[in-house]
Amino acid sequence: MDGSIARPRPFLALGLSLLTALSLATMSMLVKLAGKKGASLPELVFWRQAITLVCVVALLALTGQMASLRTQRFGAHARRAAYGITGMFFVYGAVILLPLAEATTLNFTAPFFAVMLSVILFKERVGRFRWGAVALGFTGVLLLTQPGQSSIPLFGAAVGLIAAFLVALISFQIQDLNKTEAPWSIVFWFTALTTPLTTLALPFFFVPHDPETWAIIVAMALCGAVAQILLTASLRFGSAAVILLMDYTALLWATAYGFYIFDRAPPPSLWLAAPLIIGAGALIAYRERLLARQRRSDAETA
């Protein structure tokens, strides 16, 4: 893909986002599995970034697309890298601290934070419809976490909510970069800027691993690389609100992985909370679609 301004292609964005959800769910499962085998969080983040960087550079060199990495928006890439690496620590941390299905469900609050960010960053007017959806979604969060009563640790729940906030923020950053940058360029600069930072922490956390653990770590990093490229491409062809909606399919994979890999069935509270959170996110995405259609109509008649 070149660095030209992307044209909306909703069905392509939909397919890419579904594949992204599967890749991210698989990556989360492997992160949790590697953590149980003794791999530390900083170490996992390092290998995730380093292996992705090697894969991206190798593919671009083989396909003769190194020129696509040129950019005049280094500052925007640096900001995306800063938020992205912070978000990665929180996302991985939530997966390690919480059961897979619960961590995945908390990540679904990203559309609610996207609504809040649209008000703060873009001064967008948000009506009762979307604020009602946000309130409905956070009611689901309270049902899931049940402060003071649930088996879910509050610290883990807080990490999961911060991760969702950062996912929403990063989605806006990627969507902005996609206006001028190729997906390969966005992924490259993210990994190129953050790999040296995570390398500094590696000597303090690295421990030897057996071949099985190394295989899990490498598979985790490869799944993450694929997911990042797919997510970046999907945001190039569709809106952040609609793309985030497709993330909900990850709950199916997370539930299955949790049951078959970690022998943990979801608690009853999940089945009460997840429909509220998912339904609220769907309402937000539907409203965003209506508003986008109205803006296009207004622009055409102006």
Image: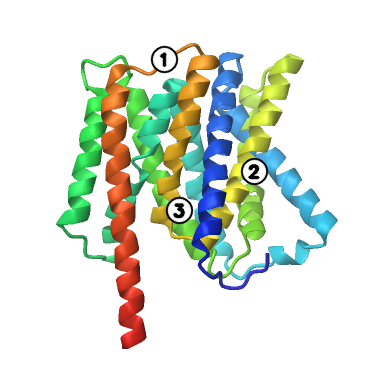
Q: Earlier in the sequence, mark 2 or mark 3?
A: 3
Q: Which mark is residue 171?
A: 3
Q: Nearer the viewer, residue 208 or 254?
A: 254
Compute the Cα span from label 2 to label 3: 17 Å
**Residue 205: image location, x then y, percent:** 61, 23
Q: Label 3: how many residues lie within 10 Å, few (<14), some (14-19) or many (20+)?
A: many
| Residue assigned mark 1 | 265
Residue at which label 2 appears: 226
Placement of 41 over or under 192, stated as above or below: above
Q: Quadrant of residue 214?
A: top right
From the viewer's perspective, tell me whether residue 55 is left or right of residue 262: right
Residue type at the position of mark 2:
Val
**How far from the left and from the top, in percent, is residue 153?**
33, 19
Q: Quadrant of residue 72?
A: bottom right
Q: Is residue 171 above or below residue 251?
A: below
Judge by depth and name the residue closer to the eye, 254 or 197: 254
Q: Residue at x 48, y 60 (%)?
A: 238
Query: SS at mark 2?
Result: helix
Q: Earlier in the sequence, mark 2 or mark 1?
A: 2
Contact between labelled residues 1 and 2, with CB atoms less than 8 Å apart: no
Task: Nearest to the eye among marks 2 and 3: give it.
Answer: 2
Q: Is 228 left, or right, of 136 in this rendering? A: right
Please provide percent x and percent y for residue 131.
19, 51
Q: Name the residue: 63% across, 63% down.
A: 182
Name the residue: 41% across, 15% down.
265
SS of the residue under disc 1? loop
Measure the C-alpha gap from mark 3 to mark 1.
31 Å
Residue 262 coordinates in the image, percent (x, y): 51, 14
What's the residue type where badge 3 is placed? Ser
